[in-house]
Image (spheres, rainbow, N blue to C red):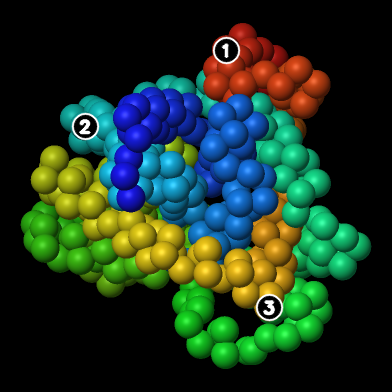
């Protein structure tokens, strides 16, 4: 695919910016991308963007990173695929490496809680605005709207995300397409993951870790990790703490916290862990291992997705997966709201950001920065 002049620089600027302000996890990242590539730049139609959201939910890896990679591919071919993905990932990796250096050197983390307090309500407003805009395109009729509501309720009561996506897609395919085959499930697999209760702390982890073993471990995680970034906790606890003994529980919790504190992909947690276990080389190896599968999966997906949309029954499947993905985003927003909107300052920030985003279409960048500043100012009144 020939790359028009200037498109790579355009992609680099956009995804570097999103990588720097992308707090809040995959749902918030996707909301910001929708605003940038659909609302502002018109690179994709809302329907096409929804197809990408649904499709990336069906392959392993971090959804928002894969969305960035796929947008880059559609905009500027194979070079765009690499530029968009790397520019979205690199800011988080560099910031996380800085945190890891401070953690290893001083044994503590910077105090950023007041700023994060203000960012989180703003992110809820950003996600809600995106769900509203995308939902008007995804819910093409009462059957899809009913399916989306059912998926949202099932998610809120604890059903697995991948199970809901597959069930929603298959039900939609059979209901809307009136043709289909359950053989579709043969090439879609969802690994079972368990939630492991963490307890206690301990002393430092094992001293010497092979870079090869470290890279292979994170390569495996990146190749099989489905669902939200929170599923990562179960994989890391089982492998790094219980199986290998490379980390203790306290170090793992600190690593997960850093993934939440920094902008960009939550999987930058791997960078922090790699630095603790192997210094800068360990950080590079762990980061490459966990993100490499996403580039491979998206490259393969880009070759087959247009053909899938031309099939009647697969088009119905994708429509159903799209509305199911949005239902999961809505359910995540509800869960985040319960844990975030616990004081009047948080409500003030959320309502102000929602009004600014929906009524005046203020860019997500300013909503995030404004939330951080107001959160710091109102921090003394937080109960």
Q: Which residue is mark 3?
A: 313
User: Which residue appears at 20% of the width and 66% of the height?
Assistant: 216
Which element carries disc 1, helix, strand or loop? helix
Q: Is residue 240 left or right of residue 278?
A: right
Foreground disc of the pair 2, 3? 3
Q: Which mark is first along the chain, 1 or 3?
A: 3
Q: Secondary structure at mark 2?
A: helix
> Residue 38: x percent and y percent?
61, 37
Looking at the image, the residue that sits furthest to the right is 142
Compared with 365, 141 (above or below) is below
Q: Nearer the viewer, residue 376 or 10?
A: 10
User: Is the residue marked by circle 1 packed among few (<14), some (14-19), or many (20+) residues within 10 Å?
Assistant: some
Query: Residue under circle 1?
Result: 373
Q: Residue at x 61, y 69 (%)?
A: 310
Location of the C terminus (image quadrant): top right
Q: Is residue 307 visible?
A: yes
Circles 3, 1 touching at the beta carbon (< 8 Å) = no
Within 10 angstroms of label 2, few (less than 14), some, or many (20 or more) residues?
Answer: some
Residue 167, image quadrant:
bottom right
Q: CA distance from mark 2 to mark 3?
A: 52 Å
Q: Position of residue 89 (x, y in %)?
A: 34, 40
Nearest the eye: 328 or 338: 328
Q: Which mark is residue 101?
A: 2
Residues at marks 2 and 1, CA–CA distance in whole angstroms? 26 Å
Q: Nearer the viewer, mark 3 or mark 1?
A: 3
Binning the other alpha carbons within 10 Å of mark 3 as few (below 14), some (14 to 19) or many (20 upward) gives many
């Amino acid at each position: 695919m020939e790359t028009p002049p200037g498109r790579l620089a355009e992609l680099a600027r956009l995804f570097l910016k999103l990588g720097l302000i992308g707090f809040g996890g995959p749902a918030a990242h996707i909301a910001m991308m929708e605003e940038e590539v659909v609302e502002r730049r018109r690179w994709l139609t809302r329907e096409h963007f929804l197809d990408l959201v649904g499709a990336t939910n069906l392959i392993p890896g971090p959804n928002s990173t894969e969305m960035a990679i796929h947008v880059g591919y559609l905009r500027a071919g194979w070079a765009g695929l690499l530029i968009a993905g790397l520019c979205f990932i690199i800011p988080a990796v560099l910031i996380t490496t800085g945190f890891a250096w401070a953690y290893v050197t001083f044994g503590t983390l910077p105090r950023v809680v007041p700023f994060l307090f203000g960012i989180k309500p703003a992110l809820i407003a950003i996600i809600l605005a995106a769900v509203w805009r995308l939902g008007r395109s995804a819910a093409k009729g009462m059957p899809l709207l009913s399916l989306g509501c059912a998926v949202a309720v099932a998610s809120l009561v604890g059903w697995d995300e991948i199970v809901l996506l597959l069930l929603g897609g298959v039900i939609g395919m059979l209901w809307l397409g009136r043709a289909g085959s359950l053989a579709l499930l043969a090439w879609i697999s969802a690994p079972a993951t368990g939630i492991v209760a963490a307890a206690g702390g301990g002393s430092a982890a094992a001293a010497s870790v092979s870079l090869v073993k470290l890279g292979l471990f994170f390569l495996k995680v990146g190749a099989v990790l489905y669902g939200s970034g929170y599923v990562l906790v179960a994989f890391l606890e089982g492998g790094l703490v219980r199986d290998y003994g490379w980390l203790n529980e306290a170090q793992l919790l600190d690593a997960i916290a850093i993934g939440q504190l920094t902008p960009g992909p939550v999987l930058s947690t791997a960078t922090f862990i790699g630095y603790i276990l192997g210094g800068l080389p360990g950080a590079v190896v762990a980061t490459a291992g966990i993100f490499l599968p996403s580039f491979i999966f998206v490259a393969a997906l880009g070759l087959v997705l247009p053909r899938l949309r031309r099939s009647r029954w697969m088009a119905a499947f994708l429509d159903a997966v799209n509305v199911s993905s949005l239902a999961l985003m809505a359910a995540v927003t509800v869960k985040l709201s319960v844990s975030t909107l616990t004081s009047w300052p948080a409500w003030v920030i959320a309502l102000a950001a929602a009004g600014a985003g929906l009524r005046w279409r203020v860019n997500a960048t300013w909503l995030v920065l404004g939330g951080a500043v107001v959160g710091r100012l109102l921090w003394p009144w937080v109960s």
